[in-house]
Structures are given as structure tokens and as C-alpha cells.
Amino acid sequence: MDARAASLWRSYLLVWCKGLMMGAADIVPGVSGGTLALLLGIYERLIRAIRSVDHHALGMVLRGRLLAAWRHIDGTFLLCLFSGILLSVFLLAKGVSWMLLHQPVLLWSLFFGLILAALPQLCSKLRWDRWRLLLLLLGVLLALGIGQLQPVELQPERWMFFVAGAVAICAMILPGISGSFILLLLGMYAPVLLAVTELQVLPLMLFASGCAVGLLSFSRLLACLLARYHDATLALLIGIVMGAMYRVWPWQLDGSPVGFSTYLQWHDSLQFGWALAMALLGVLGMLAVLQLERLQQPGERISN
């Protein structure tokens, strides 16, 4: 294998690892895969790639120009990323469910550290002015408002899996808004997670179809906003990520963040030492991925 091929494989592997992180985030109510995509520096490329799955790509396929269509949609990037996401979802669904039930403080601490580590670098990419700071504040308030909503419980019909997929996928690619949390609000989180863990084919097909429709539609809106109002859109998205940190505060009661004293009224320990260790692990993990990204020379990265 020559040096160029080896460097491309390293780039593919890095994107795949980012997909693993996004998939793990998408499982947890309160954490968004879109948040990880933004923090990991692949958000805009992801939106452009999804947006490019259009009639032009279809026309190329119908004319037999498969390689051109693959390049048009940035197919290698999408394949690496979504294979990582799907593998992570199927491998980690049971483990994350167990941690949410038995060790929620440690799980939230891990993601709190992940997000906290990348925010300074993300903020440094913009030139801030009064209007962008106002958009940042608006994003914070929007995320806090959504975080105050309360989940519902219901017995889902089959068609609801399609609707849940279409709505939740929009949140999954919107930083700071958790697709899993939206599923909780809709009363569909438990049914979808059960369908994944038990491989229920029909519900999963309906959910996937809804995801495809929602993803292709919403990505066009985001691509348009990023193309016309790039810095303003990023300022709003960063604000949403900051506001969403309220949802990943490690100490929670019935899904609502609380202070140390209130938490201790219901639990024997804060698990502060372990929580700090998990947050540090999240920080180190995020910094390691960001450092690997910086070490990639321009010629080694998958072409944008």
C-alpha cells in the first residue's frame, strides 16, 4: 500500500470513529449526534453531502454514471460516517440502556466532558459581534425551552414509527437538540429502542423511511442557511449546544437537573470522584479526536 492510500485509509478511519461517537450520542436522551458532528468539525460537510442526494444524483445513476453519482454525494464520507453510526447504535443500545438505568451520573458525566472539551475551539472559529452574540443567546434560550418540555407515554400505532423517524432525525442533525429526547417527548423512545434491541423488522423499516424523508428535507433548509448566513447560523447552533448542556448535567432526578444537596436527598452518594473521572475521560477522548484531525495534513484528508 503506497503512502497516499495509507493516508486516505487513516482519514476514512477517523471519519468512521467520529460516526461511532455520533451513534453513541444519538442513543442517549439529551445528547445530539448533530452536536458531536458540529464539535468534531464535520457538520457542514455532512449537511452538504446529505443535501447532494438529489435529482442530479438520481439522474447520474439512471444514466449509469455510478462513480460520478458516488462522488457527487460524497459517498465515501457518508459510508464511513453512517456505518460507524449504525454499528455504534446496534452495539451500544443495550449498554447505554443499562447505564441510563443503573449508572446515569457516570453516563451523563462522560458526555458532559465530551461537549465541554470542544466548545472553546468551536467558538474560536467565529468572529463575534453584537448580532452573533444575540443569536448565541437566542440559541441558548431555545435549547433551554425545549429541555423543559415533559415526555409523554402512549401505545404507538405502526404509522407513528414513520412520523417519529421524520421528526427525530431533524433533531439528530440539529446540534444541541437530542433526537432521543424528541422521541421521549413523543412517547416513542422505548418502542424504538425495543425495536432496535429485538430487531423488529417492520417498525424499524417504518422508522428508517421516516428518517430518510425528514433527513433529505431538513438538510436542504440547513444547507441553505449555512450557504447564505454561515456565521450567523453557526452562532445560533453554538448557542443551542451551550443551552443543551443543561440536559446533560450529570445529577438529575426524573430527567431534570438538580443541585448536589437535592440529589443527596434521594441518593446515598454523588459519585463525584467517578463522575469527575468519566468527565475527564470524555474531555481526553474529544481532545484526542480533535488532535488527530489537526495532525491530518491537507493532502491526507478525504477531499471536501
Image (spheres, helix red, strand yellow):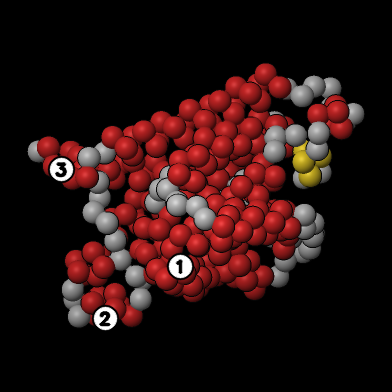
Residue 59, numbered circle: 2
Q: Please report whichever mark, 3 or 2, sits nearer to the chain's N-terminal start.
A: 3
The answer to whether residue 198 of the structure is visible from this angle is no
Tell me which amino acid carries mark 3.
Answer: Ala
The front one of 135 and 203 is: 135
Label 3: how many residues lie within 10 Å, few (<14), some (14-19) or many (20+)?
A: few
Tell me which amino acid carries mark 2.
Answer: Gly
Q: Please report whichever mark, 3 or 1, sits nearer to the chain's N-terminal start.
A: 3
Q: Secondary structure at mark 2?
A: helix
Q: CA distance from mark 3 to mark 2?
A: 30 Å
Q: Residue at x 47, y 35 (%)?
A: 286
Are the two marked residues, 2 and 1, in contact with CB atoms closer than 8 angstroms? no
Q: Position of residue 235 (x, y in %)?
A: 53, 56
Residue 5, numbered circle: 3
Q: Secondary structure at mark 3?
A: helix
Work out which residue is located at the far top of the displayed protein and give it. Answer: 273
Q: Residue at x 66, y 25 (%)?
A: 275
Left/right placement of residue 187 relative to residue 8 reads: right
Q: Position of residue 16 (x, y in %)?
A: 37, 45
